[in-house]
Image: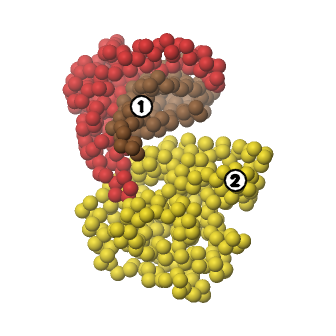
Chain colours: A brown, B yellow, C red
């Protein structure tokens, strides 16, 4: 699978602003396919961000989060070149993770 | 549905807003076809209709008309959902064909910064060539199968090529060639002709109806209508090209859609792109 | 950060994904081997932490009880930014921020969605009490932002109108 995580993390000296976009269908379980069959729910349950190994945000998502979900938050500290890790796992046990350098 | 019916009724009762509505392409004299005058008339029509919309903002369609929608769009554009398509398109564009050649080898200027000039009239075949069709010609010339013109890899490639032209003034050319003028005129006639069970023309919604609500949507004006393509449409949950949208519009007014590579769609895109002339390339974009 | 809060968020009911742990551990080597990530840098999302029961609730009261173990009081110190009319119910930008001190969690609820809780965020010390994301709304509904701060629960709400599109929806 191609990379599913796009992240932009920018430090201004005091805080680091993190924006991420994850490629995921986030199927709600309420939508039917072309043949009229319900597409089973398939969604990211847990998404975790860590800065230099310390968790800075844990997101718990349900099936009502939009397809290709977006998240934005910020934390104190973080400087250019620091490592931010992003990791998710979905309700079918699929997962992905990556690290990015703070800009 | 009530609104839709009201709009349909209103559209039926309205006299054609532009004189062009009655043009019959079969009888049009090439000397009478005047694309430059058409785009000037359309620009003036919409500037009068929407005096508070800055001229270049017409590329933003419904977001130029409705403050609430604009605010949501600006939120979404913080990290636009087409970003995956854009990255993928860039990779596809950079990847060599099995014979070692690239898309860049078959497109003018290596494909970079060319989207503002498409569709083009191809004097050799006498047909309109959209950027999508140019990409497929390149593939066929290198022994590869054509891509679907509506979505998937083609839309991703368009996202990249359009992004590399973003901000450039759209400059579609209708050369002084009777075949080119006829193609333009056919596209214009398609745009203004009523069809389908609802008896709508493209112009019913995008000229006379522009700015009105159609249930939750706001109808975008014809000026700038396709300047932000390809788009990530929330309704689709994916990327699509202009042709994908044409098919959707046809279905909406209950018309059997044309083939994606049909002359009708090529000519229509030629006309609409010409109507964007002077506006900046604003794609890839997002729409509801 | 209060212990109560983290206990609450960590203490969730049936953990249907516990059986995943083995698979997860087994695939770690492959993951680190293949990816650009360094093992030391990645903190993996833990499926066992997911509050499954809370996400299955269909009323505000049940959802808050399952997620936080208490009820919320309205607070003017929470800013909930949501559109009055969603341009498309499938993608509704929602931003929550608050001036309340000692925030430990933020949750977004949509009262008329099939399941009440859309998203919940655990906010560790040092992370700003402000989160933006995009959610789906099934129909016109009250959206509720819930903030856990200092062991108490606060909320703010807004109505978001969802209209079907006319251009192909």
Label 2 neighbourhood size at 10 Å, few (<14), some (14-19), many (20+)? some
Rendered image quadrant of residue B136: bottom right
Q: Secondary structure at mark 2?
A: helix
Q: In the rendering, at what x and y percent does residue B191 appear? A: 47, 72
- For the image shown, how many numbered marks are present on the structure? 2
Pointer 2 chain: B
Reading the image, the residue beneath label 1 is A42
> Residue at left 59%, top 26%?
A99
Q: In the rendering, at what x and y percent does residue B27 appear? A: 53, 86
Label 1 neighbourhood size at 10 Å, few (<14), some (14-19), many (20+)? some
* A85 or A32: nearer the viewer: A32
Rendered image quadrant of residue A98: top right
Reading the image, the residue beneath label 2 is B139
Q: Secondary structure at mark 1?
A: loop
On screen, residue C167 versus residue C38, left or right, reads left
> Residue at left 64%, top 78%?
B179
Q: In the rendering, at what x and y percent does residue A3 appear? A: 58, 33
Q: Is residue C37 above or below residue A21?
A: above
Whether labels 2 and 1 belong to a single chain: the reply is no
Pointer 1 chain: A
- In the picture, the quarter occupied by the N terminus of chain C is top left
On screen, residue A44 versus residue B277, left or right, reads left
Q: Is residue B208 above or below residue C125?
A: below
* B206 or B182: nearer the viewer: B182
């Amino acid at each position: 699978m191609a990379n599913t995580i796009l992240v932009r993390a920018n430090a201004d000296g005091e805080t680091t602003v993190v924006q991420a976009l994850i490629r995921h269908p986030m199927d709600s379980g309420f939508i039917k396919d072309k043949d009229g069959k319900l597409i089973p729910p398939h969604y990211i349950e847990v998404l975790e961000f860590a800065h230099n190994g310390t968790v800075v945000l844990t997101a718990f998502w349900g099936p009502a989060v939009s397809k290709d979900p977006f998240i934005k938050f910020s934390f104190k500290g973080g400087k250019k070149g620091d490592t931010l890790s992003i990791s998710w796992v979905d309700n079918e046990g699929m997962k992905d993770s990556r690290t990015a350098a703070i800009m | 549905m009530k609104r839709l019916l009201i709009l349909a009724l209103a559209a039926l009762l309205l006299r054609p807003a532009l004189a062009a509505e009655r043009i019959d392409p079969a009888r049009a004299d090439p000397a009478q076809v005047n694309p430059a005058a058409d785009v000037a008339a359309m620009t003036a029509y919409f500037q009068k209709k929407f005096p508070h919309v800055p001229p270049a903002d017409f590329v933003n369609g419904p977001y130029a008309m409705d403050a609430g929608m604009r605010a949501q769009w600006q939120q979404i554009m913080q990290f636009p959902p087409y970003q995956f398509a854009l990255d993928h398109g860039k990779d596809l564009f950079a990847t060599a064909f099995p014979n070692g050649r690239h898309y860049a080898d078959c497109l003018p200027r290596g494909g970079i910064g060319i989207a503002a000039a498409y569709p083009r009239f191809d004097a050799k075949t006498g047909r309109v060539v959209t950027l999508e069709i140019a990409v497929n010609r390149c593939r066929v010339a290198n022994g590869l199968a054509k891509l679907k013109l509506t979505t998937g890899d083609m839309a991703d490639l368009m996202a990249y090529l359009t992004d590399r032209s973003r901000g450039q003034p759209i400059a579609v050319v209708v050369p002084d060639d009777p075949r080119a003028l006829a193609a333009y005129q056919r596209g214009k006639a398609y745009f203004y002709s009523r069809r389908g069970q609802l008896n709508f023309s493209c112009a019913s919604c995008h000229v006379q109806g522009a700015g009105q609500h159609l249930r939750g949507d706001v109808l975008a004006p014809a000026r700038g209508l396709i300047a932000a393509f390809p788009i990530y449409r929330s309704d689709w949950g994916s990327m699509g090209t202009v042709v994908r949208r044409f098919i959707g519009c046809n279905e909406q007014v209950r018309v059997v859609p044309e083939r994606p590579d049909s002359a009708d769609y090529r000519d229509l895109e030629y006309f609409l792109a010409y109507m964007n002339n002077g506006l900046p390339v604003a794609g890839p974009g997002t729409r509801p | 950060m209060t212990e109560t809060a983290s206990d609450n968020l960590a203490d969730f009911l049936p953990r249907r994904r516990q059986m995943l742990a083995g698979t997860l551990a087994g695939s770690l080597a492959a993951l680190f081997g293949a990816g650009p990530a360094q093992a030391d840098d990645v903190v993996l999302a833990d499926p066992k932490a997911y509050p499954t029961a809370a996400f299955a609730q269909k009323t505000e009261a049940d959802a808050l009880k399952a997620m936080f173990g208490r009820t919320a009081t309205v607070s003017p110190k929470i800013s909930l930014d949501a559109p009055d009319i969603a341009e498309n119910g499938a993608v509704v930008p929602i931003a929550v921020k608050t001036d309340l001190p000692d925030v430990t969690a933020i949750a977004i609820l949509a009262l008329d969605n099939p399941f009440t809780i859309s998203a919940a965020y655990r906010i560790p010390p040092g992370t700003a009490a402000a989160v933006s994301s995009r959610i789906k709304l099934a129909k016109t509904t009250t959206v509720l932002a819930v903030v856990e701060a200092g062991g108490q629960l606060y909320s703010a709400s807004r109505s978001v109108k969802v209209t079907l599109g006319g251009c192909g929806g």
